[in-house]
Amino acid sequence: MAENKRNTSITSNPMIENISYYKTAQDGKLYFCSGKTRIEVVEHFADHGKTLDVLVEDVITHAAGANTGNIRLN
């Protein structure tokens, strides 16, 4: 008697972490892809805003739970 073999394994529901990915196009643009959705990833910084190093310092200070005000760490 031949058995009817099929995939009976139980899989978890698809979550965004399992079905999404980043892809770089031939023109060098980075895209976030999830299902049929494709979003171009771009970063915008104000011309006269904080610089990246100041933003990183702010994040580190906030994560450490310290309130150092405007003290620079260079």
Image (cartoon, rainbow, N blue to C red):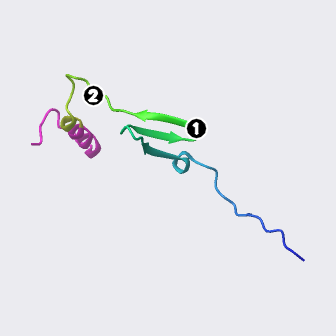
Residue 36 shows which numbered tag? Answer: 1
Characterize the local packing of mark 2: few (<14), some (14-19) or many (20 or more) Cα atoms within 10 angstroms.
Answer: few
Q: Percent from the top left, x then y, of residue 1?
A: 90, 77
Q: Nearer the viewer, residue 33 or 9?
A: 33
Q: Nearer the viewer, residue 45 or 57?
A: 45
For image coordinates 54% across by 51% down, the residue present is 18
Q: Secondary structure beneath disc 2?
A: loop
For image coordinates 22% across by 36% down, the residue present is 52
Quarter of the rendering containing residue 72: top left
Name the amino acid type tagged 2: Phe
Q: Which residue is mark 2?
A: 45
Quarter of the rendering containing residue 35: top right
Quarter of the rendering containing residue 2: bottom right
Characterize the local packing of mark 1: few (<14), some (14-19) or many (20 or more) Cα atoms within 10 angstroms.
Answer: few
Q: Is residue 54 left or right of residue 32?
A: left
For image coordinates 27% across by 28% down, the residue present is 45
